[in-house]
Amino acid sequence: MIGSLLAWFTDPANWSGDDGIPYRLWQHLWYTAVTMLVAALVAVPLGLWVGHTGRARWLVSLANSVRAVPTLGLLLAASLWLGPKLPGDLAYVVPSIGVLAILAVPPLLAGTYGGIGAVDPSARDAAYGVGMRGRQVLWQVEVPNALPLMMSGVRSAVLQVVATATIAAYLGLGGLGRFIIDGIKLGDYAEAAGGALLVALLAIGLEGLLAFVQRRVVSPGLTGRAVGGSRNDDEREGREDPADATVDLRTPA
Amino acid sequence: MKRTTSAVALVAASILGLTACGGGDDPLAGDTGSESASGGGGAIVVGGADFSESTLLAEIYAGALQAQGIDASTKLNIGSREVYLRALQDDSVQVFPEYTGALALFYDDSYDGTDADEVYAHVQEVIPDDLTVLEKSAAEDNDSLNVTQETADEYSLTTIEDLQSVAGDLTLAAPPEFKERPQGIPGLEEEYGVTFGSFRPLSGQAIVQALANGQAEVANIFSTDPSIAENGFVTLEDTKKLFGSQNIVPLVRADRADEVKDALNAVSAVLTTEAIADMLKQTDIEKKDPQEVAQQFLSDNGLDG
Amino acid sequence: MDWLSSHWDEVVQLAGDHLYLAGIPLVVGLVLSVPLGWMAKRWSRAYPVVVTTTGLLYTIPSLALFVVMPLILGTQILDPINVIVAMSIYTIALLARTVADGLKAVPDHVEQAATAMGYRGLRRLVGVELPLAVPVISAGLRVAAVSNVSIVSVASIVGVAQLGNLLIDGFNRVIWGELITGIVATVLLALALDALIVLGSRMLTPWQRAAGGHP
């Protein structure tokens, strides 16, 4: 099994052309990026608004229950409904990205809303105390303080999208999922396993990248780095009390 | 402490209890198959692939077996030939509706016979020892290449050969396995010199939709599929019989063949292409249940015990 | 909902199968996560190892895991046990870290008080730390439950029967009633499991409901 897997990876035919690993990898990245953009356009403003004003909290609960909807079912329904109405490749791309984006909203929203909610109230009070107005408080105090959790939400969402995009291959979408689905259909388990490995590697790579971004973007005051690192050596960097874990746990494909 | 233990026990018990009673009869056995009186011999599981016709045939075979008192159930939606052949060999299923030509080619990829009896004889020669085929039926279901009326008019297409000069500009939609199978893309290139510009691997209904909505100009649809007539597609003639003879035949494990051959041969004796096409119209266009349609067929032919 | 009323039995059967395939891994995964999470909390060097490994397991796409399982386990290709093992792996991947974090959230002084009272080792874990970690663990378990129910429907692509079959058949034959029923039934199943876990969690933490006045 490992032998045939290695053979699949080292076969030069698998590295060129439309069916090749580089092209599919690029497709997968592209789908992920577009999906995240669409989801962020919805989730981030919404999360900031709900977190800052404290209104319409039911929106967050609603978003969380969206996690219960099966990805495959939504993909099939969207494809059946929208497919006939769209020309060419759009018939596959639009329903897929639409569904993937809908499913990426809950973790993003949870991260954004939770992040604002976890902001130290005394920081907020101090901001109002020095005369800042609502919007200033939001952007200059709340958002920077909420960044750790927001980034956590982003990381969860990205992981989820990378994984769920593989299922969309069942409906004709490209990307790394093609190797998995085609491999299954053909009984070529080396191809299927190869595709799975690539997805896992992509996810890990993106996770590492985002962790790096998080470290750069989050204020040192929050991570305790500026204070000489007296915090625990575990992953507490910028995370709030883990007992508050109603937020940003991932849902996979 | 007591309250904790009892609470934990309650939650665990309710989850397990729900799954146990919800699972009904052993969820590890076949899915939506019906029960029956137990006859001689053990239970038989009839498998089916993930397209309507295979489901229909599986239900027909299972129904015929039950009518003879055999405890038969179905296991449907099994992905592809490569997968379900393994299922047959590891005894997850014991019976599977198959096609003579496809079987012959699967086990002997250089075979090019096309006569129905010849193909059947060849199948018997090349399949592994632990499997066997029962009598074949007259009913056939071949791969076929289809285009829309507009495409046929535009390029003056009536046979597959006509595609030779234009295929480079066209997209083919077919199941993923079509890419590698000898009767698929390699065969088209070899026999007809037809090489498509691009290939869309799709499943089931998505292929019909792709052809109907323009994501592909040519589509591989099974010849008995009612969607061909429904959508006014044009089937291109297979002049060189690349898709060969594809008589429907039960593929069974050699060690269970004796138990099932009476019931299944009786089915094969009355199964025709027209009957299949008509039944598929009922399941796919009229949305009737495959099980009901199968039962109707069996009773119309006096095979429902 | 004509389709549903004429196919009620079939839907209930498939729902039961679905619950079995999603629920058993929850129990198995939880049971196996407790020792893992405890180890990660107890030895600080184990924590990143556990978190990274479980994170890795999580990135494997479900479809691929279902397919590869028979090869790893040596089981029959259509055996539902493949799905159950795969789902248990996902559950552990989600819960190991949650259990560790939940145990970590137990304040030090509580731990010390318990030790002073004579609770040690396993007894302290089961009698004091785990009960206090219940809110965190149950939050994780809820997410695991909902996601398990969603992933299991993908198993139809490899021929294991459950509610996902309604999705595939509904799509193939273009029967909207079946497709919608499949989606709604899956959502309801997930919400039901979620509610069950909330109920269990509330029963296990009576002190959170105490209306004050109790020390």
Image: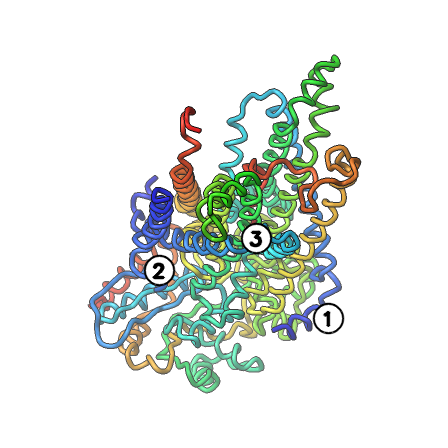
**Residue at left 32%, top 55%?**
B20
Give the class, few, some or many, for how many residues have Cα within 10 Å of label 3's Cα (few <14, many ≥20).
many
Determine which residue is flagged by label 1: A10
Mark 3 vs 1, N-terminal side:
1
Task: Classify mark 2: helix, strand or loop.
Answer: loop
Q: Amino acid at mark 3?
A: Ile
Query: Which marked residue is nearer to the observer: mark 1 or mark 2?
Result: 2
Q: Nearer the viewer, residue B191 or A72?
A: A72
Alpha carbons under labels 1 and 2: distance apart? 41 Å
Badge 2: chain ID: B
Please check whether the numbered discs 1 and 2 fall on a single chain. no
**Residue at left 73%, top 69%?**
A13
Q: Nearer the viewer, residue B179 or B85?
A: B85
Give the class, few, some or many, for how many residues have Cα within 10 Å of label 1's Cα (few <14, many ≥20).
few
- Specify the label residue A167 is tagged with: 3
Side of A219 relative to B231 (left or right): right
Determine which residue is flagged by label 2: B27
Cβ atoms under marks 2 and 3 closer than 8 Å: no
Q: Amino acid at mark 2?
A: Pro
**Residue at left 67%, top 59%?**
A198
Residue B267 falls in image quadrant: bottom left
| Count of marks overlaid on the render | 3
Query: Which marked residue is nearer to the observer: mark 2 or mark 3?
Result: 2
Q: Nearer the viewer, residue B121 or A213?
A: A213
Cβ atoms under marks 3 and 1 closer than 8 Å: no
Badge 3: chain ID: A
**Residue at left 28%, top 79%?**
B259
Q: Residue C69 at x, y = what percent?
A: 52, 65
Q: Residue B74 at x, y = what percent?
A: 35, 64
Give the class, few, some or many, for how many residues have Cα within 10 Å of label 2's Cα (few <14, many ≥20).
many
Is there any visible trace of residue A69 in the rendered image? no
- Specify the label residue B303 is tagged with: none
